[in-house]
């Protein structure tokens, strides 16, 4: 049974009701000596409580899409993640027959199609667009990750048959699943609504989680002697997607929440040759180290600084990109209002060619409700800071 979805929730709800009822009905009828009866009663009470706790956890996971599968929950991750975690001295692609080795690198970054997730039927592609489930393998980073790719309706329309679309990478937070971008925040539907309302232009969305070596949080960083996450997202993903779909190879956008917001801003500020604009939804702007990251910098202060966006604004020339920072006045923590204001001040001081815009809510938090409220403006802003669909070639 899948970790996400109603079947598991319904099963747990039945257990939450059935176990207490069963406990009451059999309480006085349990067989055996007194010690055995006591043990059985405690087991029934304990099972009832566990079922209730697990039901709440399942409902929260369905809401936040923190874990997309039992493998994610148990920390197994994908084969690629296992290889990257087990061999921190190398950044390898997926294991299995034909998997690349240091002596046998992949020929090129590539996209492999998976079963259709069923977001729309073929007859509706030209009016609603299509979501494809894919794996992306990188030739430079030697990493592989899953993604959902949204192709807008125009992609399938005759008038756009020979046009290349702007593209944007969309990141969830950590430890979120890319499924949350498809269901919890529903980026495809939100973009579709914005385009229909003439508030945005069509884009191809590449929806991903920011960690390529789950359960480790790599913070979109090229880890010394470890996973080359920044290279994967900044170089391999655009190369692979542009070689598979009709998208522009330069002038990409990036948008994400929390850790994904840090990654989005980081891609734009460190790789302005590929990225033109970024949106950070309750993101942060400094290097992070905790139990989920470990040492991402190889003990090097230089590497730490270069991944710290605030340090870069203080000490390096500003990049020619645009960044939208969203936050709420009452949002606390490292991704809250105070830190966002500090980044905005540094960015304004750095000046051109960097351009920064702020979207500040009076009330909000580090949650899907706040990001959903910000998405219409964020999607509109991002689409208008990217080039419109242009003739192929």
Image (spheres, rainbow, N blue to C red):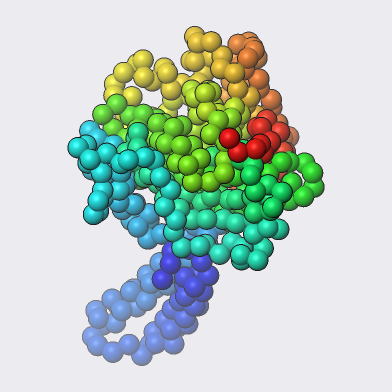
Please tell me which residue is depicted at 57% across the width and 24% down the height of the picture.
339
Q: Could you tell whether 270 is left or right of 215 in the image?
A: right
Question: How many labels were placed on the picture?
Answer: 0
Residue 104, image x and y in percent?
Answer: 23, 40
Residue 60 appears in the picture as rendered: no
331 above or below 35? Answer: above
Residue 237, image x and y in percent?
Answer: 45, 39
From the viewer's side, name the closer residue of 141 and 218: 141
The picture quadrant where one finds residue 34 is bottom left
Quarter placement of the C terminus: top right
Quarter placement of the N terminus: bottom left
Q: Could you tell whether 216 is left or right of 356 in the image?
A: left
Please tell me which residue is depicted at 65% across the width and 66% down the height of the picture.
123
Residue lying at the far right in this picture: please name it: 197
58 above or below 91? Answer: below
The picture quadrant where one finds residue 343 is top right
Residue 63, image x and y in percent?
Answer: 56, 57
Residue 107, image x and y in percent?
Answer: 32, 40
From the viewer's side, name the closer residue of 226 and 153: 153
Please tell me which residue is depicted at 30% across the width and 41% down the height of the picture.
106
Q: Could you tell whether 39 is left or right of 383 in the image?
A: left
From the viewer's side, name the closer residue of 199 and 243: 243
Residue 108 appears in the picture as rendered: yes
Please tell me which residue is depicted at 51% across the width and 66% down the height of the picture.
5
The picture quadrant where one finds residue 277 is top right
From the viewer's side, name the closer residue of 277 and 176: 277
């Amino acid at each position: 049974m899948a970790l996400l979805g109603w079947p598991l929730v319904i099963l747990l709800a039945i257990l939450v009701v059935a176990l207490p009822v069963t406990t009451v009905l059999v309480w006085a009828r349990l067989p055996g000596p007194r010690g055995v009866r006591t043990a059985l009663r405690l087991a029934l009470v304990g099972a009832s409580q566990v079922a209730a706790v697990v039901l709440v956890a399942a409902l929260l996971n369905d809401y936040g899409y923190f874990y997309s599968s039992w493998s994610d929950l148990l920390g197994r991750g994908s084969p690629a993640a296992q290889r990257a975690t087990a061999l921190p001295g190398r950044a390898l692609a997926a294991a299995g027959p034909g998997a690349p080795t240091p002596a046998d690198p992949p020929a090129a970054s590539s996209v492999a199609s998976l079963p259709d997730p069923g977001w729309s039927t073929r007859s509706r592609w030209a009016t609603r667009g299509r979501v494809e489930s894919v794996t992306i393998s990188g030739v430079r980073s030697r990493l592989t990750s899953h993604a959902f790719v949204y192709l807008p309706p125009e992609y399938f329309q005759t008038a756009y048959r020979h046009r290349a679309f702007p593209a944007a990478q969309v990141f969830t937070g950590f430890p979120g699943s890319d499924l949350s971008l498809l269901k919890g925040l529903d980026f495809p539907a939100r973009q579709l609504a914005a385009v229909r309302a003439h508030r945005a232009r069509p884009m191809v969305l590449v929806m991903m989680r920011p960690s390529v070596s789950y359960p480790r949080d790599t913070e979109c960083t090229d880890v010394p002697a470890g996973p080359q996450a920044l290279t994967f997202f900044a170089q391999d993903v655009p190369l692979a997607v542009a070689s598979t779909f009709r998208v522009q190879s330069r002038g990409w956008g990036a948008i994400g929440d929390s850790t994904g917001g840090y990654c989005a801003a980081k891609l734009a500020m460190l790789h302005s040759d590929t990225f033109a604009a970024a949106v950070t939804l309750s993101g942060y702007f400094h290097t992070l180290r905790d139990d989920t990251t470990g040492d991402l910098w190889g003990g090097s202060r230089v590497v730490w600084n270069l991944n710290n966006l605030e340090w870069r604004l203080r000490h390096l020339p500003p990049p020619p990109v645009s960044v939208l920072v969203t936050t709420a006045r009452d949002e606390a923590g490292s991704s809250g209002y105070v830190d966002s204001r500090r980044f905005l001040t540094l960015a304004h001081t750095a000046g051109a060619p960097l351009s920064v815009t702020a979207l500040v809510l009076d009330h909000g938090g580090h949650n899907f409700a706040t990001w959903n409220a910000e998405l219409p403006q964020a999607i509109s802003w991002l689409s208008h800071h990217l080039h419109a669909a242009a003739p192929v070639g």
